[in-house]
Amino acid sequence: MIYPGTDIKFRVTTEIPDFQLSGDGFEIVVLDRYKRMVARITKNDCFYDSEGNWYFTLSKVRTGWYYAFFTAQRQDEDYDDQRAQYNDVQPLCVVGYCEKHAPHLHDCDKGHHEVHYEQVWSVSVDGEDYLADCYGRYVYGSDNKRIQFTNATSEYVEEMGKVKMKMTGEEFLRQWEGRSENGKMDTVPELYDAMQGISDDKTVIDEIDDQIEEDTPERVSPEDLANFEV
């Protein structure tokens, strides 16, 4: 049983086609039995371990039973933007009760979901967090080393998924090699053309200011107007 006031850590895994937690965006909203939002967990709120598994936490949970609403976008070329929305909602955990006393957690067969949650534990050593079992013993990875956690907002995080361009090969070549007659500076060669003649010690803004100053006519003083003759 999970006791009220406990900090809980969950591992989240998915079997969604053409989707990776490491490379795609996702969000998890935790709801109570009355559909009230308890927590909104973005990808930046999560962390991952040296084995590539992803985790999130809930702090000081109250008595009750909870659901997880998972939402993400996955690659699907059948749609105009080549992305398809994916939603999944299922029971997450029960706090302060034995699970057999929480019938709401049994109204859904977790085996038929493509998103899976598992409660896990961790231990902290010298400021570093490592995966542990329910008895506090280290869990070792495939390299026989302790599995260490890394926060997703850390400067060391690199997206491991592949970046897919939303343009055709012809559009890409036009963007990088072509020129257009639409009166706009919207290709790379046109940008280079506009920047010719700008010295290395000046910015584009400096060059624009200089051009404005050169093109601005001299101001006429009131004395000049008084002495002006037609």
Image (tube, rainbow, N blue to C red):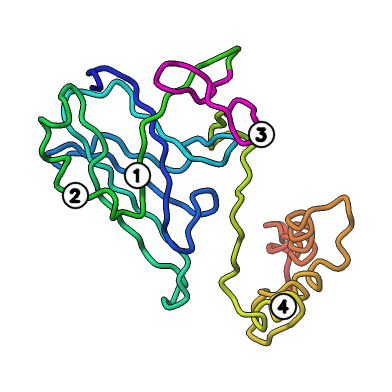
- The vertical placement of 185 against 97, above or below, is below
Mark pair 1, 2: CA separation: 18 Å
Categorize mark 4 by other alpha carbons within 10 Å: few (<14), some (14-19), many (20+): few
- The x and y percentages for residue 216 are 74, 64
Mark pair 4, 1: CA separation: 78 Å
Can residue 97 be seen from the camera position used here?
yes
Write the residue at 68% across / 74% down: 185
Is the C-beta separation of discs 4 and 1 under 8 Å? no
Categorize mark 1 by other alpha carbons within 10 Å: few (<14), some (14-19), many (20+): many
Residue 230's disc is: 4
Q: What kind of residue is marked 2?
A: Cys
Q: Which segment is the magenta one? A: 128-147
Q: Which residue is mark 2?
A: 108
Q: Which residue is mark 1?
A: 28
Quick one: quadrant of the C terminus? bottom right
The answer to which of 223 and 101 lies nearer the viewer is: 101
Is the C-beta separation of discs 1 and 3 under 8 Å? no
Mark 1 or mark 2: which comes first in sequence? Answer: 1
Q: Secondary structure at mark 1?
A: strand
The answer to which of 202 and 190 lies nearer the viewer is: 190
- Which residue occupies the extreme bottom position in the image? 181
Mark 4 or mark 1: which comes first in sequence? Answer: 1
Q: Nearer the viewer, mark 1 or mark 2?
A: 2
Write the residue at 59% across / 76% down: 167
Categorize mark 2 by other alpha carbons within 10 Å: few (<14), some (14-19), many (20+): few
Q: Nearer the viewer, mark 4 or mark 1?
A: 1
Quick one: quadrant of the N terminus? top left
